[in-house]
């Protein structure tokens, strides 16, 4: 079974940077997409960046030009480089992986989250 563990969150001043990591353990038959979501207090969880198996990458408008999603070739580690951070980027960040498992069931796995706090 796939497990995802995020790291790299923390407290940073506005304008600063953080590099979030997501480490995968366990195998999956095929990966459809990997991505990062975030959820701020009192707000709905939103998709921040998504990377699909065909190489397509999409970002929510509010982070375009500031955040970059990437992974290693084996897709065992995924990163989210966050630059020029703003107070409104403060949230818990979650990594996700979706794909066909060995029982042919399509599943989405979530990490436990890492907190990013941006001070003004």
Image (tube, grey):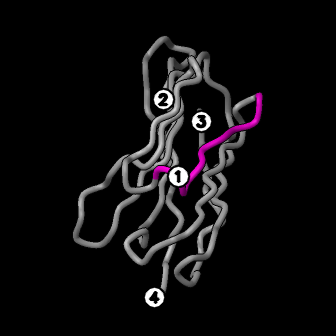
Q: Which one is earlier in the sequence, the residue at label 2 or at label 3?
A: 3
Residue carrying label 2: 98
Residue carrying label 4: 120
Secondary element at tag 3: loop
Which numbered disc, 2 or 1, marks the residue closer to the eye? 1
Task: Count how many numbered circles sit on residues in the image.
Answer: 4
Residue carrying label 1: 65
Q: Residues within 10 Å of mark 2 (few under 14, many from 20)?
A: some
Whether residue 67 appears in magenta in the rendering, the answer is yes
Q: Position of residue 101 (x, y in %)?
A: 53, 19
Secondary element at tag 1: loop
Q: Nearer the viewer, residue 19 or 23?
A: 19
Q: Nearer the viewer, residue 28 or 40?
A: 40
Question: Residue shown at 52%/32% (left/top)?
Answer: 57
Vertical relation: 4 (above or below) 55: below
Q: Position of residue 13 (x, y in %)?
A: 56, 84
Q: Which numbered circle lies on residue 2?
A: 3
* Residue 6 location, quadrant: bottom right
Alpha-carbon distance for marks 1 and 4?
20 Å
Whether residue 118 appears in magenta in the rendering, the answer is no
Which numbered disc, 1 or 3, marks the residue closer to the eye? 1
The part of the chain drawn in magenta is 64-73
Secondary element at tag 2: strand
Pointers 1 and 4 in contact (C-beta within 8 Å): no
Alpha-carbon distance for marks 4 and 2?
35 Å
């Amino acid at each position: 079974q796939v497990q995802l563990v995020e790291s790299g969150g923390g407290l940073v001043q506005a304008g600063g940077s953080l590099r979030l990591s997501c480490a995968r353990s366990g195998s999956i038959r095929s990966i459809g997409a990997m991505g990062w979501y975030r959820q701020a207090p009192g707000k709905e969880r939103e998709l921040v960046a998504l990377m699909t198996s065909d190489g397509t990458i999409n970002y929510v408008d509010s982070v375009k030009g500031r955040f970059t999603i990437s992974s290693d070739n084996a897709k065992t580690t995924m990163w989210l480089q966050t630059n020029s951070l703003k107070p409104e980027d403060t949230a818990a960040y979650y990594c996700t992986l979706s794909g066909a498992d060995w029982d042919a069931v399509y599943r989405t796995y979530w990490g436990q989250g890492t907190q990013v706090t941006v001070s003004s």
